[in-house]
Image: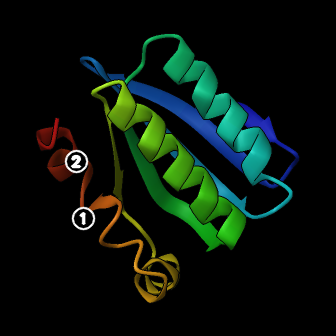
Amino acid sequence: MANIDGLVTIKEDAKGDVLILRISGRLDAVSSPTAERKVFDYINNDQYKLLFDFGGVDYLSSAGMRMLLSITKKLKSLSGKLVLFAVTSNVMDILKMSGFDHVLEIVQTEEDGLRRF
């Protein structure tokens, strides 16, 4: 488990070749760059199938959205994929207002997410 700046916690879990990252806290201008580096460490270690558990994310800023976009683009270039699940209604509202709900793959449950790979 990685605690980032006291604002975000990322807990790893694996199901087969899918890496599940359980993220909790705030993804904002302070925490997003560090969280992004942590996720890129996984990608650089050949983890191209990432499933983000967003159930514990209570705040997402534009910096957090940039992080998600950057991870999505990187994985796409490596024939990988990022799927989010358990997105809270408040974070989902932010994603919908910005149109990110059409850019990111978002599902309800972990099982739905695993079926996307």
Callout 2 secondary element: helix
Front-lying residue, 89 or 49:
49
**Position of residue 23 measured from the top left corner of the image (x, y, whole percent):** 57, 49
The image shows residue 68, relative to residue 62, as above or below, that is above
Q: Callout 1: few (<14), some (14-19), or many (20+) C-alpha neighbours within 10 Å?
A: few
Determine the residue located farthest toward the top in the rendered image.
Answer: 45
At label 2, which amino acid type do we have? Gly
At label 1, which amino acid type do we have? Gln
Q: Quadrant of residue 25?
A: bottom right
Front-lying residue, 26 or 42:
42
| Residue marked by disc 2 | 113
- Give the residue displayed 36% in from the left and 63% down from the top: 86
Q: Quadrant of residue 79?
A: top left
Looking at the image, residue 90 sits to the left or right of residue 101; the answer is: right
Callout 1 secondary element: loop
**Position of residue 35 measured from the top left corner of the image (x, y, whole percent):** 70, 42
Does residue 49 appear anywhere in the picture? no
Q: In which quadrant will I find the C terminus?
A: top left
| Residue marked by disc 1 | 108
Q: Callout 2: few (<14), some (14-19), or many (20+) C-alpha neighbours within 10 Å?
A: many
Instruction: Give the distance between the C-alpha atoms of the residues marked 2 and 1, in whole angstroms.
Output: 8 Å
Determine the residue located farthest toward the front in the rendered image.
Answer: 77
The image shows residue 114, relative to residue 58, as above or below, that is above
Looking at the image, residue 6 sits to the left or right of residue 87; the answer is: right
Looking at the image, residue 85 sits to the left or right of residue 11; the answer is: left
Q: Earlier in the sequence, mark 2 or mark 1?
A: 1
Does residue 52 appear anywhere in the picture? yes
